[in-house]
Amino acid sequence: MPPAAKTKKEAPRAWQRMISGRRLNLLEPSPFDVEIEDIAHGLARVARWNGQTMGDHAFSVAEHSVVVLEILDQLYPGTPHKWRLAALLHDSPEYVIGDMISPFKAALGVNYRDFEDRLEAAVHLRYGLPPKLPKEVKRKVKRADVCCAYFEATQIAGFSHAESVKFFGRPPADLEIEIRPLPVKQAQQLFLDRFATVLAEFETS
């Protein structure tokens, strides 16, 4: 008898099953498969600084995102609600890919950036934001993000003041932020509550 024909090798699975039951295609993410509950669930379980922080709890990306919005509001009062929503969601791709430290992102190169950009675009479209933010908005969100990194570095990540200034710059003198890492469930709910408030303000503005 002739040997049995070999079955065609299946393509590797390119989707992730989310806690909501959604199947998110990682290569071509669709806005229709993005759920804020999945984002909050994931970000609350992703630790900033690869978990190398002081205290009983990791400082999650979910809580970091809320603090970045708080800083943006202080630095740029009157920012339109749509861009405040963008600030809250600025690290949303990390609910899928985790929080890679900047040196590792640089080593991975442009392919990683493209992957991150596609995920961010899907999240933005899901909640009424443009796939790509205007440069000035990105600049303001980035400044708030870097200020947050300064406070995280000095308060919970073991950096000296001089090191923090070297790597993240000196925040405005009148900007004072206390970093208090929360338990996972509290961080998750904090993110969801802030999202609901900002989204409602955006939709009624």
Image (cartoon, rainbow, N blue to C red):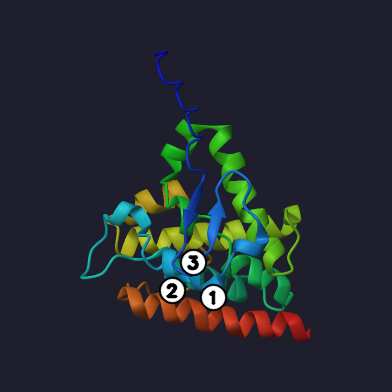
- Disc sitting over residue 21 in the figure: 3
Using the image, determine if residue 190 lies above or below residue 142: below
Q: Is residue 169 visible?
A: no
Which type of secondary structure does the marked residue at label 2 adopt?
Answer: loop
Q: Earlier in the sequence, mark 1 or mark 3?
A: 3
Residue 77 seen in render = yes
Secondary structure, mark 1, is helix
Q: Residue furthest front?
A: 1
How far apart are the two marked residues, 1 and 2, measured between alpha carbons?
Answer: 9 Å
Per the rendering, the mark at residue 177 is 2
Q: Amino acid at mark 3?
A: Gly
Q: Considering depth in this image, is 77 or 137 the residue closer to the camera?
A: 137
Identify which amino acid the numbered label 1 is placed on: Glu
Nearer mark to the viewer, of 3 and 2: 3
Numbered badge on residue 70: 1
Indicate whether 120 appears above or below 155: above
Image-quadrant location for residue 130: bottom right
Please identify, in this view, whether the residue under mark 1 or under mark 2 is nearer the observer: 1
Residue 137 in picture, x, y percent from top left: 71, 60
In what quadrant of the picture does the C terminus appear?
A: bottom right
Q: Which residue is farthest right?
A: 205
State whether residue 167 is above or below residue 10: below
Q: Looking at the picture, which amino acid does disc 2 mark?
A: Ile
Viewer-proximal residue among 52 and 114: 114
Using a 10 Å C-alpha cutoff, classify the residue at mark 1 as few (fewer than 14 neighbours), some (14 to 19) or many (20 or more). some
**Which quadrant of the figure contains the N terminus?**
top left
Picture residue at 47% right of the left edge, 37% below the top:
12
Give the residue displayed 68% in from the left and 62% down from the top.
124
